[in-house]
Image: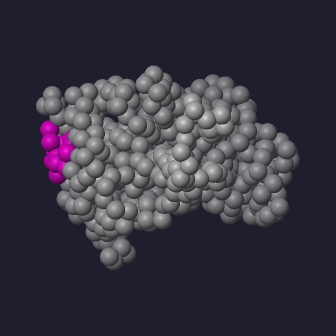
């Protein structure tokens, strides 16, 4: 597949006017007949209507998934054939890039440059986990005596996946690919703000050969479809990505049914800039780390910790660069920042900035909603850099989830580490320095799940991804997440010839 050709072609107008739930291998309407609208955050234009699934649809999807798991239509397919099907799905995804990219851009408001860079890589998750299932092995333990104890990895059952709107396809695939490779059946609840690309993954997997009922997708709202899925007692596992408050509610509901949960939640990631860094390089890095996806990502570098020796120079240059970023229609290849996802989200961002100003912070750039031209039509908010802040300020402590960043000075290495770890979150961090010893030394002292050194945001299906503290638990990517979607079954075989009579023998083996 010529990926380069696909991503350089202008997006085609292929989006349908309506999408249904994907249940039992086909697209169907919601049981209640309701539908909702998906609109462009940049213009307010209608993207499509989508079936509004609720508890009845979640039940239909779960029953379909359970039947598929019980009759073995996917479980019993050989690992090699599972791999072939997942590679075929990766190929089909690449063939449909133009369509998927347009769906993602129009639904989320993310700049098309971002999606042309991100979406083509999503297929790699199918290929990586398809390869893993071929190489997954059990083992034999040193059990002792005339016994052989072997164990094998088997799937869990029906897994529920709840995915967000900010990276709809990528985050859904980070869950779907390992769960599917491990042999499970799935019920997926995508965000109501951007569900279309996730629904289309159901179609792609079916076209690749995944049997009906194995992957089911129920678009709908959190208080109805999301609640029903998280409370379903038949789930073997629940995997969610979302904000920390939402994670608490969902994990609590699942916990009442003793359903194990993995959760990738909120963040307030620091980026540490040491005095030996090239300031211009560090400014470029911070701008990317902070404002890509219009700051709507849980790993966005929203706390910039800069050594006092270069603080003023860094702050001035970053404010100038951020102020010059081009906002506009996300379908325009020249646009660098699109809108935020909704008016509600923009209002939340405004409230954070206004409170910071009242508490004495200085707005170094941005901080004002644009009201002229095409920017007035959508939910735009400019890249905003805030200085003169204290570590206890709300804007420093809490996740804003928008293009709002604070900058603080630090004195030395110990001070930087203290500031970094002084947060209830622990998802990610960045370190910018030319001192390789310092880089590793500091990284090992940070209470976060992901650390980038002299870079940021880079991801790979083989690289463990997840947080500490209030940023969640469990991991995505890599061998670890594959094993989390399996369980071991231990089998003990007596191959000895000696007779055993526990009640008739004085020295019979008990355990």
Q: Which of 356 and 137 is in front in this view?
A: 137
**Colour theme:** one colour
For the point 37% across and 52% down, the residue is 183
Regarding residue 293, the answer to whether it shows in the image is no
Residue at image x 32%, y 46%?
Answer: 185
Q: In which quarter of the image is residue 92?
A: bottom left
Q: Which residue is drawn at 81% across and 54% down?
A: 441
- In the image, the segment drawn in magenta is 16-29
Q: How many labels does the image show?
A: 0
**In the rendered image, is residue 33 in sight?**
yes
Q: In which quarter of the image is the C terminus?
A: top right
Residue farthest to the front, as pictured? 504
Asked if residue 17 is among those painted magenta in the image, a careful observer would answer: yes
In the image, residue 348 sits, relative to residue 405, either above or below, namely above
Nearer the observer, 53 or 394 = 53
Position of residue 482 measured from the top left corner of the image (x, y, whole percent)? 49, 53
Residue toward you, 209 or 245: 209
Q: Which of 96 and 477 is in front in this view?
A: 477
Residue 324 vs 449, above or below: the answer is below
Tell me if residue 55 is in the magenta stretch: no
Quarter of the image for residue 30 reads: top left
Q: Residue at x 64, y 61 (%)?
A: 455
């Amino acid at each position: 597949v010529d990926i380069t050709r696909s991503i350089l072609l202008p997006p085609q107008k292929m989006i349908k006017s309506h999408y249904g739930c994907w249940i039992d291998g086909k697209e169907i309407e919601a049981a209640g007949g309701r539908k909702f609208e998906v609109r462009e955050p940049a213009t307010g234009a209608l993207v499509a209507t989508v079936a509004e699934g609720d508890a009845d649809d979640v039940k239909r999807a779960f029953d379909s998934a359970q039947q598929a798991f019980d009759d073995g239509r996917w479980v019993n397919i050989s690992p090699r054939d599972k791999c072939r099907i997942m590679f075929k799905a990766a190929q089909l995804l690449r063939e449909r890039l133009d369509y998927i990219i347009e769906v993602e851009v129009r639904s989320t408001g993310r700049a098309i440059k971002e999606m042309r860079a991100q979406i083509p890589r999503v297929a790699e998750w199918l290929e990586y986990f398809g390869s893993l299932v071929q190489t997954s092995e059990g083992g034999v333990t040193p059990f002792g005596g005339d016994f052989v104890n072997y164990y094998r990895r088997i799937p869990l059952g029906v897994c529920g996946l709840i995915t967000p709107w900010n990276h709809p396809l990528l985050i859904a695939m980070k869950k779907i690919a390992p769960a599917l490779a491990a042999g499970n059946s799935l019920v997926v609840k995508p965000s109501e703000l951007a569900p279309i690309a996730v629904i289309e993954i159901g179609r792609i997997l079916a076209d690749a050969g995944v049997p009906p009922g194995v992957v089911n997708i129920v678009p709908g709202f959190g208080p109805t479809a999301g609640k029903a899925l998280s409370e379903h007692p038949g789930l073997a596992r629940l995997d969610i990505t979302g904000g920390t408050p939402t994670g608490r509610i969902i994990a609590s509901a699942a916990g009442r049914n003793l359903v194990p949960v993995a959760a990738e939640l909120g963040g307030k990631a620091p980026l540490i800039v040491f005095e030996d860094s090239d300031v211009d390089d560090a400014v470029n890095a911070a701008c990317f780390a902070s404002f890509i996806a219009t700051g709507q990502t849980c790993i966005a570098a929203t706390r910039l910790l800069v050594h006092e020796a270069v603080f003023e120079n860094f702050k001035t240059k970053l404010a100038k660069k951020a102020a010059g970023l081009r906002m506009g229609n996300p379908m325009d290849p020249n646009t660098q920042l699109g809108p935020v996802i909704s008016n509600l989200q923009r209002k939340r961002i405004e409230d954070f900035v206004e409170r910071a100003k009242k508490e004495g912070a200085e707005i170094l750039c941005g901080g004002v909603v644009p009201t002229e031209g095409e920017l007035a039509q959508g939910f735009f908010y400019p890249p905003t850099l805030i200085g003169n802040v204290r570590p206890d300020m709300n804007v420093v402590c809490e996740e804003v989830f928008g293009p709002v960043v604070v900058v603080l000075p630090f004195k030395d290495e110990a001070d930087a580490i203290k500031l970094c770890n002084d947060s209830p979150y622990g998802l990610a961090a960045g370190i910018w320095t030319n001192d390789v010893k310092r880089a590793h030394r500091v990284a090992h002292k940070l209470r976060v799940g992901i650390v980038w050194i002299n870079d940021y945001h880079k991801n790979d299906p083989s690289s463990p991804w997840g947080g500490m503290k209030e940023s969640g638990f469990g991991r995505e990517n890599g061998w670890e997440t594959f094993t989390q979607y399996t369980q071991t079954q231990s089998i003990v075989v007596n191959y000895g010839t000696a007779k055993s009579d526990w009640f008739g023998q004085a020295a019979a083996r008990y355990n």
